[in-house]
Amino acid sequence: MRLTKSSQSGSVLIWTVIVITVLSAAAAQVLHVVSAKYHNALHTATWQEALLASESGVDLAIRELRRSLRPAPNQAWDGWANVNSERYGISVVPNAGLAGTEMKIEVNVDAPWQLKDPANLWQYYRVRAIGTMPITGPARAADNKQDTRLRKMSLRADRFTGGVLTSQAVDKPRVSRRVEAIVRPVSAFDQAVVSLEALNLNDANIIIDSYDSRDTTKSTNGLYDVAKRQRNGHIATNSNLINAGNAHVYGDVSTNAGTVSNAANVTGVQRTDFYQEPIPVGAPTWPSVNASPSLVLGLTTLNASATEGSAASRYVLSSITLAGTEVLNLAGAADGSSTHIEIYVTGDISATGLSQIVVHPGVKATIYFAGGVKVSGNGLVNKNNQPGNLMMYGITPPPNTLPKTVELGGNGQLTAAVYAPDFYIHMNNTGTRGIAYGSFVGKTFTMTGTTDLHYDEALGSMGRISNYKIVSWFEDTR
């Protein structure tokens, strides 16, 4: 009997060991599978975060490009190295989504000569960014090696250089993703109307549309033709409300997460994702100018020059004050060939009554103004009939200074492009019908009375650059 009990006890012990062994093996297998799945999920998340890091690098580059548009000192490219005419920057930032794991962002910005627009010589920029995230856990593939290869993990060798990780700057497994983007400059006159705050159209008879003076199918002899009307007369605001006033807007209407009221006659899309950072306008810092005259009163002629930027055709005036039938002539060549003139008015510009500021044929005029502008009737006459030949820029005032006003009134014709992000712009037609050709950017924009505004799409490739936008993007998957 004792022998039987001993045999039974031995059998139980053997079966117990077998069961424990089987369960341990099963538990080990389950643990291996779970661990592999966990690492696979972690690798996937890290792979996605590396792409976000590289995209952030593109954003950092565009931020610096935008800073460079501001008047000096603008702190653009501070902390970035300049290597062989390329800007190079490194940022290390914590990633809250992965327990504060630091992501590394490397960015190169260069300006290849092939990426220069031959029409206006504007430079496009190439941005290449690498986002790197360290991989926690062992330097081995997860349950599926093909998945690791697909995501191009750098577990033991750097995927870009092929070097062993321990000989590189980063001595542990990581994932890196590299993207390349091309960014283009954007004109300050990219739309018909842009307002930083309120935008009001107060008459149902107002018409805003577009044409393209460069294209014979969208204009006639470079001039607006209602039969060739285009629907790119876009208006936008950084604010959250546009009062369209039932005006006929042949284009999109955009707000900053806001609404558009009285929009029955808007033909385009109503968007809520608009925001345009205003680029301040600094006072010109010309090394030399034509010192005569220092102000304009009465009949005056200022001569343009065939050479752009010539000191002889640069003027600094304390004010322009015209009344009655007085005229300021911006005169060019007798044959109407292309000439240039730049004027900086440190005070106010006023042309009332029948007085006029006349831009003669062939003259391309740029006027900077620090004071208010008040023009009535046919006070601004652009004989070229092209808004690109008369560009006006409002100088950003000192801090804590109340905005000034640009008042454009009467029932005449206005052909100009106005960029004054710190000025209140008011277009007021007091006659039967006013017509404006061009583009307007202001702190606020108000149009009253019966007025037509025809936006020349050619303005989108001239004037000051106010922004940079991505035109192409791809990931380097080598």
Image (tube, helix red, strand yellow):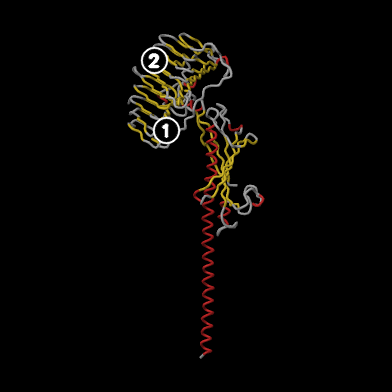
Image depth: mark 1 or mark 2 in front: 1
User: Which element carries disc 1, helix, strand or loop?
Assistant: loop
Tell me where residue 451 appears, x and y as whole percent. Answer: 37, 22
Asked if residue 336 shows in the view, the reply is yes
Asked if residue 362 shows in the view, the reply is no
Tell me where residue 29 appears, x and y as whole percent. Answer: 53, 66
**Which residue does the image show at 54% across and 57% down from the upper left?**
39
Reply above or below: 275 against 417.
below
For marks 1 and 2, the one nearer the N-term is 1
Quadrant of the rendered structure where residue 260 is?
top left
Camera-side residue of 236 and 28: 28
Reply above or below: 79 against 313.
below
Quadrant of the rendered structure where residue 446 is?
top left
**Which residue does the image show at 58% across and 36% down from the upper left?**
126
Tell me where residue 151 appears, x and y as whole percent. Answer: 56, 51
Q: Residues within 10 Å of mark 1 (few under 14, many from 20)?
A: many
Camera-side residue of 222 and 217: 222
> Could you tell whether 424 is left or right of 159 in the image?
left
User: Which element carries disc 2, helix, strand or loop?
Assistant: loop
Camera-side residue of 74 and 35: 74
- What kind of residue is marked 2? Gly
Reply above or below: 394 against 252.
above
- Alpha carbon of mark 1 to alpha carbon of mark 2: how far? 30 Å
Camera-side residue of 284 and 299: 284
Tell me where residue 142 appears, x and y as whole percent. Answer: 56, 58
Q: Residues within 10 Å of mark 2 (few under 14, many from 20)?
A: many
Reply above or below: 153 against 465.
below
- What kind of residue is marked 1? Asn
Residue indicated by mark 2: 377
Residue indicated by mark 1: 238
